């Protein structure tokens, strides 16, 4: 590497190794500064904004301030209407004059990759919200130094996010896919730090815990790794856990966005917020109703997207079933982790039993740790139960019980005394 301060610049692998050594050994305290969640309407954005353009001339000859460009009624940017930037081959580097500052700013001001307008592009949903939200529809700025960390988390309401690095050293990212892999990640995280979940069941909602991805991978989580450099975009998908740290001084900008494909994940997040008594950043039901009443709905979305919205609208109108009591029965994804780090959960189907009353079956006992995975202990990992990711289905009516012939005198369990008898009693 190059020279910095008379010493060789550390490689990415060396910085990553030093980071995890500091965290896992815990033999010294290290204080890191991190300017996170900075409102770009206050501190400024790395992308040009329409309301931030100022004339560069001064005095009597200065032109009047340029008026703000009128916005369409829906405030949604149509990609087809944007002028395409000139190709590099069309400009002669030696003979063509340099473009003025205003032309340069105007080009990137209207670019669809400008994070100030990205959440309002065609196909996005947040244009229907009653007000703009910092970090959701308004970008946030992040200024970090070496080891500035963003701990494991998912975005609010399981939203998409897009992060752009403007300048500086790289940033290490770790990520896990959503869906069933998110459930496996949560089970592995509980197995890694069960005592923290005992003290704080909503630990993963607080962005305060970092666990080694190698340990989580050995416990069954599927973790990926990448390095973001200046000029790179990083996009995280719904319900995708991610975390990481900076490799040096840098500043980046990020914003959330949502499409119609995100609605099922938003409904699941809304249900889990109710389990943990966590207030959402915006109302999912309000967003659905505003989308349904939007005059430009059929012009902005495809038939497939409209079918998704119709499906979610019907579920919003159906009241939620009562929240079930949480039990200590380990979920299927946790039971399968003890076999081997690469084993996958399997499901078995059984024939429906007769509708005769029977005593409840005991909960399955968690498997013991094996040689392939000696550190996994489901009994300690599941002291704080995992809430369901999706609302349980509505209860179905029980089928009528088949009549039993009195001549056959079938032996059955007496419902009042708990004994087997062939005679009828007063209650059954």
Image (cartoon, rainbow, N blue to C red):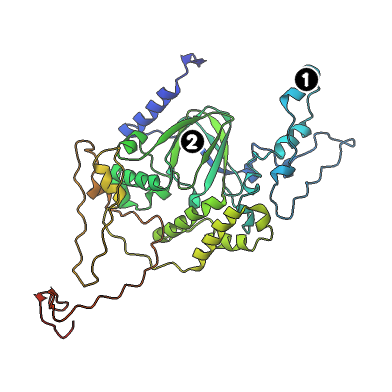
Instruction: Name the quadrant containing residue 94.
Output: top right
Q: Kindly identify which residue carries mark 1.
A: 92
- Res. 195 in view: no
Q: Residue at x 54, y 63 (%)?
A: 313
Instruction: Name the quadrant containing residue 420.
Output: bottom left
Q: Look at the picture and state if 283 lies above or below 13.
A: below
Residue 279: x and y, percent? Answer: 48, 59
**Kind of element beneath mark 1:** loop
Q: Look at the picture and state if 112 lies above or below 231.
A: below
- Res. 226 in view: yes
Query: Closest to the observer: 197 or 378?
Result: 378
Q: Look at the picture and state if 332 lies above or below 284.
A: above
Residue 270: x and y, percent? Answer: 47, 58
In the rendered structure, the answer to whether residue 123 lies left or right of residue 405 reads: right
Front position among marks 1 and 2:
1
- Sequence-first tag of 1 and 2: 2
Mark number, residue 33: 2
Q: Residues within 10 Å of mark 1 (few under 14, many from 20)?
A: few
Query: Closest to the observer: 370 or 68?
Result: 370
């Amino acid at each position: 590497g190059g020279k910095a301060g008379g010493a060789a610049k550390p490689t990415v692998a060396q910085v990553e190794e030093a980071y995890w050594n500091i965290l896992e050994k815990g033999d010294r305290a290290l204080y890191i500064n991190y300017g996170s969640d900075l409102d770009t309407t206050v501190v400024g954005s790395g992308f040009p904004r329409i309301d931030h353009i100022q004339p560069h001339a001064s005095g009597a000859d200065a032109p009047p301030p340029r008026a703000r460009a009128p916005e369409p009624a829906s405030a949604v940017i149509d990609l087809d209407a944007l002028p395409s930037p000139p190709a590099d081959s069309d400009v002669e580097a030696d003979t063509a004059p340099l473009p003025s500052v205003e032309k340069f700013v105007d080009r990137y001001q209207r670019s669809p990759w400008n994070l100030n307008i990205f959440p309002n592009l065609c196909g996005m949903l947040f244009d229907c919200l009653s007000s703009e939200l910092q970090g959701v529809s308004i970008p946030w700025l992040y200024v970090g130094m070496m080891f500035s960390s963003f701990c494991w988390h998912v975005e609010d309401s399981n939203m998409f996010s897009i992060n752009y690095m403007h300048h500086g050293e790289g940033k290490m990212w770790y990520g896990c896919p959503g869906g069933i892999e998110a459930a496996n990640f949560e089970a592995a995280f509980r197995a890694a730090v069960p005592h923290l979940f005992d003290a704080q069941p909503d630990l993963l909602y607080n962005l305060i815990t970092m666990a080694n991805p190698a340990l989580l991978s050995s416990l069954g989580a599927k973790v990926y790794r990448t390095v973001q450099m200046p000029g790179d975009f990083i996009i995280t998908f719904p319900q995708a856990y991610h975390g990481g740290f900076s490799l040096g001084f840098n500043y980046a900008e990020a914003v959330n966005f949502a499409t119609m494909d995100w609605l099922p994940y938003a409904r699941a997040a809304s249900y889990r917020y109710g389990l943990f008594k966590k207030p959402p950043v915006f109302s999912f039901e309000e967003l659905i109703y505003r989308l349904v009443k939007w005059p430009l709905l059929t012009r902005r979305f495809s038939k497939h997207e409209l079918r998704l919205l119709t499906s979610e609208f019907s579920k919003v109108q159906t009241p939620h079933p009562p929240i079930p009591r949480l039990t200590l029965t380990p979920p299927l994804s946790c039971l399968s982790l003890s076999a081997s780090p690469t084993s996958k959960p399997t499901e078995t189907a059984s024939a429906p039993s007769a509708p005769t009353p029977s005593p409840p079956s005991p909960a399955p006992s968690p498997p013991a740790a094996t040689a392939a995975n000696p550190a996994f202990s489901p009994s300690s990992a599941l002291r704080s139960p995992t809430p369901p990711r999706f609302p349980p289905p509505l209860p179905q009516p029980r089928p009528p019980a088949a009549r039993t012939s009195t001549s056959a005198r079938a032996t059955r369990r007496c419902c009042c005394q708990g004994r087997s008898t062939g005679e009828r009693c007063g209650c059954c």
